[in-house]
Structure formats: C-alpha cells, structure tokens
Amino acid sequence: MLGTSDEALCRGYDLAMLDLDGVVYISGEAVPGAAPHLAAAREAGMKLAFITNNAARTPERVASHLRDLGVEAQEDDVVTSAQAAARLLVERFGVGARVVCLGSEGLEQVLRAAGLEPVGAEDDAEAIATGYGPDVRWSAIMRAAVRIREGLPWVASNADHTIPTAFGVAPGHGVQVAMLRDFTGVEPVVAGKPERPLLDETVRRVGGQRPLMVGDRLDTDIEGARRIGLDSLLVLTGVTGLAELVAAPEAVRPTYVAPDLGGLLAPHPSPSCEAGEHRLGGWCGATADGRLVVIGDGSPEDWWRVVAATAWQHLDDVGEPVALDGVTPPSGG
C-alpha cells in the first residue's frame, strides 16, 4: 500500500518537485514550518524545484514571492505549466513560430523567452496556447474557438477546473478548456499536471536522478507522479484531508503520507498487517461493520500511515470507502 524508506526522504531522493499552493503556501501565506523544513532538506543535499500549473505568473514573480515567505528560491528553481507548454510548441513548430497567446502576460513572456512569437487571436499563426488569464476578453475566446475548430493546433497550459482566490475557490483555466473542447470537438495537448510535460520539463531544467513529487492534490500532483512512475509524498496541509485520503483509488495513492513538509526530513516506515489489523508505532487500525477504528498511541505521522493502509485495504476489498464516524486525527497531525 504505502512505500517504505529507511532513510529520510531528503537523502533517499535527490530532487523534490514541490507543488506550491497547499504545500509551501496557502492563499499566498506560508504554510507553518515550510521554510525551515525546505532549508533543512536543501542542507541535506536535496535539490528543490517549485512547480505550478498556474500559467499566469512568471517564474521570476513566483521566486520573489517565495523569498518574501522566507523560502530560498531563484528564478531557475521555478517551473510553470507555461514553460512546459512553450517547450511542446518549440519542439513541434520550431523557434520563431507564431503562436496565438490566449492568456495572461505571464504566458506571453514565457513564450517569448522560449523564442516563440506571441500574436493576437486574429493574426496568422501556426498554433494557439491557452492559459489562465482573468482579463482575457470574450471576443478573443470566440475567435480562438473558431480557429481551433478550423484546425489550428492547440496546447493548453493546464486543465485545472478550480483556482484558489482571496474570495474563495473560483473557476480555473480548466473551465475554459472544457468550453473550448465542447465547442470545437478538439482535445488539446495539456502541458500541466497530471500530464507529464511539466514534470519532464522540471527534471530537464533542475536536474535530478531520483525525483520525488510533493503535493497536496491527489488528482493532479499524485496522479501525475504515478502516471510516469515517480514516487510521491502527499502532505496534508492543502485540499486533501482525512475523507479524501481514505477514499483514494489506487491510481491516485501516494507513496508516502505526512502531515506537512517535515515528512521530507524523516524515514517512512509502513504498517505491518496481520489478521486484518494494521500496526505501526503504537497505533492499530482495523474496520468493524464498515467503520474505521484506530486505537493506541504514537506519533501523528504513524497514525496517518495506519489510517491510509487500513482504509485502502477496506476500499479494495469492499469497493466503497470506510466510514469515519468518530475518527479524529491526533493533535499535531
């Protein structure tokens, strides 16, 4: 079920590919402990790459924001879905190709940096690139939709249906992608997670022989890692909580689970299983009448490992998630 690492992950893996929102920061504010945990991982020899599906912000802006939060980061440490999209376009159409840019200034700058020529929705072009852009005009979307339906090749930076904002969870670029797909009947080439171009671009830019994906979302971070055979660490500081974890099908299950980025600095034992009971570090997990039961005492990290192993075994055996009546994570977890 879960992977096992006898040494700290920062020593067993040479590159951490870190999702940002929900992992390093939440709504722009640092996750407690994130900066010192990342500094310690880097001190142990682990490279850090900060990756994001958000195509609106340039790597320079992302790195500056991270430094403001106390996280050491340079522009070259940041890899965006816009950069992955630009790579796909250069590989197919070559440097100098004219590309309709339907997105923000961040997407436009990245396309230029890759040697492409961003143009408007009505200009001659060899392809179209789309990305999140709150100020994109409806008239431009209409023109782009017609051109995609007429055969203009289309690369989408990402297909995230939601985006966190100061006023709540709002529609993301994936909503626009779905609309264009429905209208045109065309499936775009997607650069961002869970597709592999962004992860490949990260390894290409930052380096690393044994990368580890670190994220808070099962359906992008963890699924993306599993698709290309990478190990992953799920941290529970973002959108995934107890209910989502116990209901995770095999395709989106992480290799490791930790309450926060401190999980990079520690070994990861996995629970033993005997007679339907999963045991680790003083905790014992089992199911009774379809309900999860966890007894004992120990660290929050081991509690989450026992819960994951017990719940996933139940899901695989029964076909439905275990009930969580009365189950509460321990303090500090």
Image (spheres, rainbow, N blue to C red):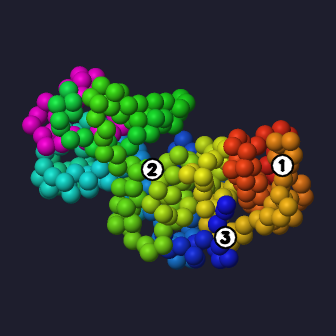
Point 20% across, 41% down: residue: 153
Q: Are marks 1 and 3 in contact (CB under 8 Å)?
A: no
Around disc 3, counting alpha carbons within 10 Å, would you say few (fewer than 14), some (14 to 19), or many (20 or more)?
few
Q: In which image quadrant can residue 178 be found? A: top left
Circle nearer the viewer, 2 or 1? 1
| Residue identified by numbered label 3 | 4
Point 29% across, 50% down: residue: 85
Circle nearer the viewer, 1 or 3? 1
Point 42% across, 47% down: residue: 53
Helix, strand or loop for disc 2: loop
Residue 40 vertical position relative to residue 305 in the rendered view, above or below: below
Closer to the camera, 159 or 42? 159
| Magenta region includes residue 38 | no
Helix, strand or loop for disc 1: strand
Closer to the camera, 128 or 136? 128
| Residue identified by numbered label 2 | 194
Residue 330 vertical position relative to residue 2 in the rendered view, above or below: above
On-image quarter of the N terminus:
bottom right
Find the magenta span and give its range: 119-145
Q: Are marks 2 and 1 in contact (CB under 8 Å)?
A: no
| Residue identified by numbered label 1 | 287
Which amino acid type corresponds to the residue marked 1 in the rendered image?
Answer: Thr
Mark 2 or 3 closer to N-term? 3
